[in-house]
Image (tube, grey):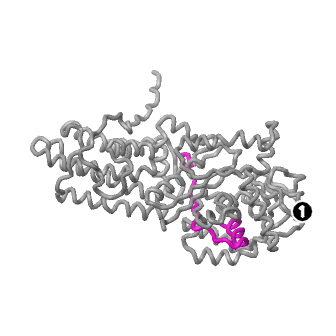
Amino acid sequence: MAEKFYVTTPIYYVNDAPHIGHAYTTILADVLSRFHRALGHDTFFLTGLDEHGQKVQQAAEKRGLSPQAHCDDLAPRFTDLWKTLGISNDDFIRTTQDRHKRIVQQILQKVYDKGDIYQKEYEGLYSVAEERFITEKEAESGQFREVRVLKEKNYFFKMGQYQERLVRYIEEHPGFIRPEHRKNEMLGFLRQPLGDLCISRPKSRLSWGIEIPFDRDYVTYVWFDALINYISAIGYLSEEKKFARWWPGVHLIGKDILTTHCIYWTTMLFSLDLPLPDTIFAHGWWLMGESKMSKSLGNVVRPLDLIQKHGVDAVRYYLMSEMVLGADASFTPENFIKRYNSDLANDFGNLLNRVSGLITKNHGGIIPEAGTPTPAEEEIISIGRTLGERVNALVHDFKVDSAINEVLNLVRAVNKYMEVQAPWKLAKTDLAAAGRVLYCASEALRLSAVLLKAVMPEKAGVVLGILGAEGSGLTWGELRSGVALPSFPPLFPRIEAEKPPSPRG
């Protein structure tokens, strides 16, 4: 049976305009799913939108729309961007869909019947901006806005009773929360008593949400509702075979929602007697220079602006190659141009141009015979034959930037090989030897394109088309001699940095 890979992004809050953070997580999930598909694994990729809560209700009221009409109007901002970014998701869930609401209500009833939900009156600090009760310590941190004292009767989930079990699970499963410092952060959080979780809002205060099945005066807390998307979309309580096939999976999240996923979600799954996710991976933030991107600072990068200027594959490549998963990364236009010119224009693009140019000039535009490899070719072949295994291991370890660099190392090695072998000189005295060099370089280019297709589906697909190698795999030697190369425009023209205007004299 083929290995399976189920990957999710967070479901994005419909009131936010999509920004580089949303784009990054979604492209990352797309790249991982494409890598796994290329490796022959059964793959399912889920993303979607979180459409309930107080902020949605308030925004809809300001616009004079119903909350549902408001959500329907805003949802295409995400779906249109995903199309532009070449996202290959298998499903797109919205929490306002009946298929999701029905499962949330069944889960609420199930947890209530188990005795894990109770009602009590509670007075505490409430963050209107975050739509949840917070501790005094959290209030003192200054990270929560619009904090006020709130007293009301609500339903609570017995989250605290699963604290010791969760600590044991995290300690016994080293790859469960990644990277390692996030696991330590959660274990540190769990050293303090874990309270119970308020999972309802009275309709008198908030009507836009999923109604609690055992008390129609309340709706579900937005996080309890949203997290369930990971199992409602793949058939929990509705399609048993589908659910058994895909669950558990990998959750990709930003580090700012670590607690909700590692504590709220895991204890909910304990209550349901379901396996926990294979991995919860929290990536870092994109910084603009040294500052976190935020609307208030006015430094949010809009992915579409970059795409319109430099193409979607260049943006995908930059985002995947620049951030070490788990750490923050800094975006500057200068970094983008430097990475693009170095990797894509000078290394990958230049190799394609040189190889195709020499084949056209000296071999009639026909891919030459492989010939008998010399030690120089054997060195390249050795790198190429094991490249798929190395990339596979790095992708499984969520080291996407390192996986990309492995492929580029082959490209760089072939560029050096070309310099040393000088097929443009060889062609004058030994055309077959020059052809052998160009076949080896072309095959390395094909193999690189097969692996880079997960990152740059359009451009790498064009390279494979030029080489007549669409649908080829990771075995060295699949490139066919005798294929005629078509002419093509430069795939990665160099980007010239804009010069600052000269001062007036």
**Is residue 457 found left or right of 379 in the rendered image?**
right
Q: Residues within 10 Å of mark 1 (few under 14, many from 20)?
A: some
**Is residue 18 found left or right of 405 in the rendered image?**
right
**Is residue 124 found left or right of 386 in the rendered image?**
right
Q: Nearer the viewer, residue 368 or 185?
A: 368
Q: Amino acid at mark 1?
A: Lys
Q: Nearer the viewer, residue 396 or 96?
A: 96
Measured from the top left, where is residue 33 in percent x and y?
A: 51, 56
Measured from the top left, where is residue 48 in percent x and y?
A: 65, 51
157 is within the stretch colored magenta: no
Measured from the top left, where is residue 249 in percent x and y?
A: 58, 64
Measured from the top left, where is residue 260 in percent x and y?
A: 69, 62
Q: Nearer the viewer, residue 147 or 489?
A: 489
Quarter holding the C terminus is top left
The span shown in magenta is 262-290
Describe the element under mark 1 as helix, strand or loop. strand
Q: Nearer the viewer, residue 390 or 258?
A: 390
- Residue at screen point 34% across, 46% down: 348
Note whether 278 is above or below 414 in the view shown: below
Query: Which residue was labeled with disc 1?
Result: 153
- The answer to which quarter of the image holds residue 339 is top left
264 is within the stretch colored magenta: yes
- Residue at screen point 75% across, 70% down: 159
